Amino acid sequence: MFSTFAVLPCFSQSSFFTPSDTLHNKRRNIVYASYGTAYTLSYIGLYHLWYKQNGMSNFKFHNDNKHWLQMDKIGHFTTAYQMGEDAINVLRWAGVSNKKAIWQGGVSGLLYLTGVEILDGFSNDYGFSWGDQTANALGSMFVIGQELMWNEQRLRLKFSYFPSKYAQYRPELLGKNWIESWLKDYNGQTYWLSLSPGSFGQQNSFPKWLCLSFGYSANGMTGSYINPTFNNAGEPIPDFTRYRQYFFSLDLDLTKLKPKSPFLKMLFSTFGYIKFPFSALEYNQMDGFVFRSIYF
């Protein structure tokens, strides 16, 4: 995910954070140059830190639609969505016309993740996944469609994470530390769809910033498709059952708050992708319904 602040220099003047009413060529050039630089450097970094170490081969395709109980596909969908909304907001800040901002910004996540998918295609360990690419495209369509319909995001995709117990058994795959596990361990990730009834209907008195949130996660996964008996160090792994989890909870939509400060508006937008911890009702295939007094 690319934060808005990854492409905007940090200035203290509030006027800097105020979106331009007309095309601001200097801002637009900053946006295009910053995104181009960030994308290029991230590809180079991924190649040297990940793909090159694992080895490269001829381009190939890989069907991984049944892996990770589809958590990775939802991750692709959410990442493309979030990158697209960020880019739309930044282009609006630069004064780019609304239609251009929606289409150019909305497809940015798809374009970037397509590059990552191509790198996967040349990797020894992976391959170009049409399942991933479909999820990328749907995520971009989800953000573009809402902007064209409502000129805002009423259905927000969010993310939460809490460390799981499974990474310790396969640190080479699920992460050797908290930061790696945050990215790699799908057992600790939950993806959410948050919506406020107050965003639908002009006479609705329900506060727009208070949302109903529906989550999906999965647990018991020490391998992508099946759980192995031993890890790379030859140590035995307990026999875990892989299962899906579904959640209902409440959430806060910071983007619906209207502070006077343009800086605060941008800050709320940047952190608007994180699901707020709340009580949650869970249903899973192991225990049925479970009430969580607090769920991250």
Image: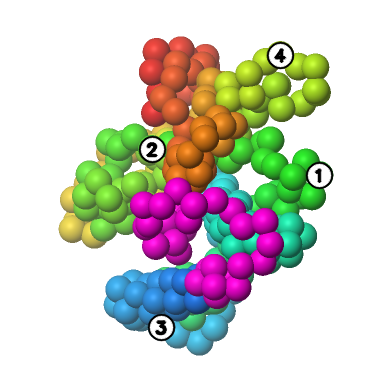
- Residue at (70% x, 42% y) in the render: 152
Instruction: Give the secondary structure at mark 2.
Output: strand
| Residue type marked 3 | Met
User: Cβ–Cβ below 8 Å for labels 3 and 1?
Assistant: no
The range drawn in magenta is: 2-31
- Which disc, if any, is residue 28? none
Q: Quadrant of residue 193?
A: top right
Q: Is residue 100 above or below residue 271?
A: below
| Residue type marked 2 | Tyr
- Residue at (51% x, 33% y) in the render: 259
User: Cβ–Cβ below 8 Å for labels 1 and 4?
Assistant: no
Number of callouts: 4
Query: Residue 148 at x, y = what percent?
Result: 79, 50
Which residue position holds label 2?
161
Which residue position holds label 4?
205
Which residue position holds label 3?
56
User: Cβ–Cβ below 8 Å for labels 2 and 1?
Assistant: no
- Looking at the rendering, in which quadrant would you find the C terminus? top left
Look at discs 2 and 1 and give the one toward the viewer: 1
Which circle's residue, 3 or 4, is located before the other in the chain?
Answer: 3
Q: Nearer the viewer, residue 268 or 41?
A: 268
Residue farthest to the bottom, as pictured: 58
Q: Decide if residue 98 is on the left or right side of residue 182.
A: right
| Residue type marked 1 | Met
Which residue position holds label 1?
149
Which circle's residue, 4 or 2, is located before the other in the chain?
Answer: 2
Q: What is the CA distance from the residue labelled 3 to the residue labelled 1?
A: 43 Å
Look at discs 1 and 4 and give the one toward the viewer: 4
